[in-house]
């Protein structure tokens, strides 16, 4: 069996909310062999409209998910539920796709990612999905960011980064430590997921950043210019520990969504 060299993206071209059962039955009728995981689906992974990922084939299994047999024999395939010639993929689907993309690239010596249409004449995976994953199809669009980190101090910590609550507040906060320049209120779910970004990156811009995954631009800072990103690591003493243990300095990233 040939080693994995390519990652191929498809869409189902269907518009129903739940599609895995439909695709499985359709592929059974088309004569695709049952997988080691019990599915007839020709693709290795299916991403539903809610972003749920279902693995339907072992990554060492091969099927004709494309009629280009050379590609089929050396690729892993991912299909997203939807018809992306007429609709746009959901944000949940795109987040799941990028997460799976990173996982597969770390595990295999994948040389490039392609849409189904790059392997044979077809409209699959649809123009709107192709637009959304342009960064995956064109990996040269990587940017090197200068990454720093900040946190939100709270009263009565045993330790502060700059000795006192007042000093840390002055550097890290503007009136309310938990409200950003965009008006967004920070919470636990945002730890290491949001950042202060340069003005040229609109609020809501998403960047796939090495060491962190997808982060969202929600804040500004007078020193945050050019390609500097200042990631929020939370509040209190737990955040101080993260400041000492999380990646900083020059890190590669790709803008994956611009409002």
Image: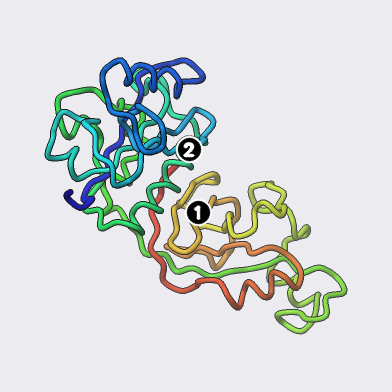
* Residue 151 in the figure: left or right of residue 229: right
Q: Where is residue 140 in the image (x, y as percent from the top left)?
A: 25, 54
Instruction: Report the Cα–Cα distance between label 2 and label 1.
Output: 35 Å
Residue at 33%, 29% in the rendered image? 34
Quadrant in which residue 219 is drawn: bottom right
Identify the element where label 1 is drawn: loop
Determine whether 236 is above or below 1 in the image. Answer: below
Precedes in sequence: disc 2 or disc 1: 2
List x then y, in percent, for residue 237: 75, 73
| Callout 2–callout 1 Cβ contact below 8 Å | no
**Residue at the image point whose x is 48% and y is 55% from the top:** 213
Picture disc at residue 67:
none
**Callout 2: SS:** strand
* Residue in view at x 20 percent, y 23 percent: 122
In depth, the one of 4 and 139 nearer the eye is 4
> Which coloring applies here?
rainbow
Q: Is residue 99 above or below residue 119?
A: below
Direction from residue 99 to residue 158 in the image, left or right: right
Q: Where is residue 17 in the image (x, y as percent from the top left)?
A: 51, 19
Vertical placement of 22 versus 61: above or below? above
Reading the image, the residue beneath label 2 is 53
Nearer the observer, 208 or 40: 40
Is 59 in front, or is 152? 59
Q: In which quarter of the image is residue 153?
A: bottom right
> In this figure, which residue is indicated by the disc labeled 1?
199
Is 45 left, or right, of 240 in this rendering? Answer: left
Q: How crowded is mark 1: few (under 14 residues within 10 Å), some or many (20 or more)?
A: some
């Amino acid at each position: 069996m040939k080693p994995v060299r390519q990652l191929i993206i498809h869409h189902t071209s269907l518009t129903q909310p739940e599609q895995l059962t439909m695709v499985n039955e359709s592929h059974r009728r088309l004569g695709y062999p049952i997988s080691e995981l019990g599915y007839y689906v020709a693709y290795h992974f299916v991403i539903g409209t809610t972003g749920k990922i279902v693995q339907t084939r072992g990554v060492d299994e091969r099927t004709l998910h494309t009629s280009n047999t050379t590609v089929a024999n050396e690729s892993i395939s991912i299909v997203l539920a939807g018809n992306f010639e007429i609709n746009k993929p959901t944000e949940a689907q795109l987040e799941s796709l990028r997460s799976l993309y990173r996982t597969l690239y770390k595990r295999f010596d994948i040389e490039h990612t392609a849409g189904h249409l790059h392997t044979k004449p077809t409209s699959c995976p649809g123009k709107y999905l192709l637009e959304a994953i342009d960064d995956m199809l064109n990996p040269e669009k990587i940017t090197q960011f200068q990454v720093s980190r900040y946190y939100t101090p709270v009263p009565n910590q045993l330790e502060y980064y700059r000795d006192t609550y007042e000093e840390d507040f002055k550097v890290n906060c503007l009136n309310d430590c938990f409200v950003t320049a965009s008006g967004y209120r920070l919470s636990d779910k945002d730890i290491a997921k949001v950042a202060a970004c340069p003005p040229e990156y609109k609020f809501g811009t998403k960047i796939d950043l090495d060491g962190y995954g997808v982060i969202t631009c929600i804040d500004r800072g007078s020193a945050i210019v050019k390609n500097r990103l200042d990631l929020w690591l939370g509040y209190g003493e737990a955040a101080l520990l993260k400041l000492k243990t999380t990646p900083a300095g020059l890190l590669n990233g790709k803008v994956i969504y611009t409002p």
